[in-house]
Image: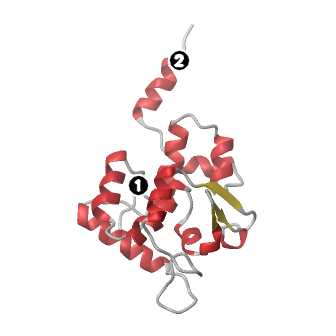
């Protein structure tokens, strides 16, 4: 959990996500930013670099020039929950989330500030912009999605790096050891 900006962002529960998206994040823009982070399992920097042309039909394209490793372009399917958030947010050509300067995207600092205020509104601590990515990847893993598939969505080159994102619950540990025996 993040404490004073240190450590890993918290993995959010279903209730925390519901509360954050219904009470904490107050504008369609803010819900769209963090909705993409969650539903696409991507970094906030990747979201802020999106152009309106990166959304085509039912897919979202994270261009390799905007990803952390700049190694490959990723295409993520837009599922219904994300589609609803995007439909509520009206966009103009250019950056999907424009910043204060013409022709520039919103800054990470601004996105951090938006999330911090949203969390303060609902009394949520230990959350960072990276919490949405960790939550998405952990939810997929908990649902039994093969790591190779999660790796394709997250863009991680190394499974070891991906595994650092995943949180294992006490119930999952108990279930894992319960299958051992003769």
Q: Does residue 129 appear anywhere in the picture?
A: no
Residue marked by disc 2? 179
Q: Quadrant of residue 55?
A: bottom right
Task: Sort mark 2 into few (<14), some (14-19) or many (20+) by Cα contacts within 10 Å.
Answer: few
Please name the residue shown 51% across and 54% down the image.
39
The residue at the far right in this view is: 71
Nearest the eye: 179 or 22: 22
Compared to residue 163, the image places residue 169 above or below, namely: above
The residue at the far bottom in this view is: 102
* N-terminal-most mark, 2 or 1: 1
Mark 2 touches mark 1? (CB < 8 Å): no
Please name the residue shown 37% across and 47% down the image.
13
Disc 1, SS: loop
Where does residue 158 sit, x and y in percent of width and height?
70, 51
**171 horizontally vs 120: left or right:** right
Where does residue 106 sit, x and y in percent of width and height?
50, 81
Picture quarter with the N terminus: bottom left
Residue marked by disc 1? 10
Compared to residue 163, the image places residue 87 above or below, namely: below
Q: What is the number of callouts on the image?
A: 2
Where does residue 113 sit, x and y in percent of width and height?
37, 76
Q: Does residue 55 appear anywhere in the picture?
A: yes
């Amino acid at each position: 959990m993040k404490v004073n900006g240190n450590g890993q962002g918290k993995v959010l529960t279903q209730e925390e996500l519901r509360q954050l998206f219904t009470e904490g994040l107050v504008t369609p823009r803010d819900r769209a930013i963090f909705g993409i982070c969650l539903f696409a399992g991507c970094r906030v920097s990747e979201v802020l670099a999106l152009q309106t042309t990166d959304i085509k039909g039912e897919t979202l394209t994270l261009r390799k020039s905007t990803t952390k490793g700049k190694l490959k372009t990723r295409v993520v399917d837009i599922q219904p929950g994300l589609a609803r958030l995007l439909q509520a947010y009206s966009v103009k050509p250019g950056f999907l989330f424009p910043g204060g300067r013409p022709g520039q995207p919103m800054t990470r600092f601004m996105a951090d500030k938006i999330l911090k205020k949203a969390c303060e509104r609902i009394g949520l601590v230990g959350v960072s912009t990276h919490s949405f990515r960790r939550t998405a990847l952990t939810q997929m893993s908990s649902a039994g999605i093969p790591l190779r598939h999660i790796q394709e969505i997250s863009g991680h080159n190394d499974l070891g790096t991906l595994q650092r994102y995943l949180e294992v619950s006490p119930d999952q540990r108990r279930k894992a050891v319960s299958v051992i025996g003769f």
